[in-house]
Image (cartoon, helix red, strand yellow):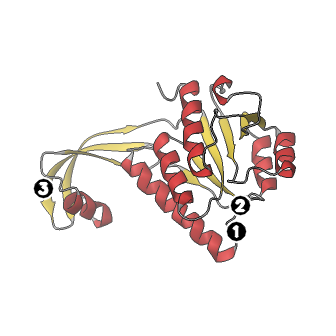
Amino acid sequence: MLAGAEGRHAGTVRRLAPGERVDLTDGSGTIAECRITGTRPGALELTVLARRAEPRPDPRLVVVQAIPKGDRGELAVETMTEVGVDVVVPWAAERCVVRWHGDRADKGVARWRSTAVAAAKQSRRSWFPEVTDVMSTSSVAERIRDTRLALLLDPEASQPLGAVQPPPSGEIVLVIGPEGGVSPQEAEVLVEAGAVGARLGPTILRASSAGAVAAAVLLIASGRWS
């Protein structure tokens, strides 16, 4: 039986009918392949045809996203989730216009997490992405020190992102700065921690779209998109 919000959406909004196939997931790699056998108000009756477990994606792609203003943060999370990003880290960068503190930080992270779950369902992901708590530059640097490859998007970098060869496994960290760019002090801290500069292309993308585009480049290079 599929009830609650999911059942109402499937039966009322999508109007799924008996005989149709649906797949259910727990967001942690487990998938149940089902067939609809009946409908009730706000619920579907299902028969499980098969179960399978999909391995966690590898290499794991982490995007450190400087917090944009307005609803551009949710847009960034939505598109990165659809592309295949595994972890999104909200970053309180020095030049961010928006400041998340206290309750505002809790509400902002909650919105990003809700957006990630909705986008994961829409894009039929078996592994839902993680959205961490807000991190400072020093916390981001600590994460970079423990990763296989860390890249800092920089339009002035000599190395193009397309020339980067990702590791076959482990964690890749991709840092996306705010609209005003990463400050020299922040760049120094991140580079000292092990981040390597890379430019995305000949044009400058908004902070809300750069993560998804850069993630797609890395997922192709890693073989996860094949």
Q: Are marks 3 and 2 in contact (CB under 8 Å)?
A: no
User: Could you say where residue 52 lies in the image, as x and y percent from the top left?
Assistant: 37, 37
Q: Please, what secondary structure does the residue beneath circle 1 have?
A: loop
The circle drawn on residue 99 is 1
User: Could you say where residue 36 lies in the image, as x and y percent from the top left?
Assistant: 17, 50
User: Could you say where residue 170 lies in the image, as x and y percent from the top left?
Assistant: 65, 33
Per the image, the residue denoted by label 3 is 38
The residue located at (42%, 43%) in the rendering is: 126
Camera-side mark, 3 or 2: 2
Q: Earlier in the sequence, mark 3 or mark 2?
A: 3
**Quadrant hosting residue 90:** bottom right
Q: Please, what secondary structure does the residue beneath circle 3 have?
A: strand
Label 2 Cα crowd, 10 Å radius (few <14 / some 14-19 / many 20+): some
Is 5 on the left-hand or right-hand side of 219?
A: left
Front position in the image: 145 or 25: 145
The residue located at (14%, 59%) in the rendering is: 39
User: Could you say where residue 147 lies in the image, as x and y percent from the top left?
Assistant: 73, 38
Name the amino acid type tagged 1: Arg
The circle drawn on residue 96 is 2
Residues at marks 1 and 3, CA–CA distance in whole angstroms? 49 Å
Name the amino acid type tagged 2: Cys
**Residue at the far front in the pictured view:** 203
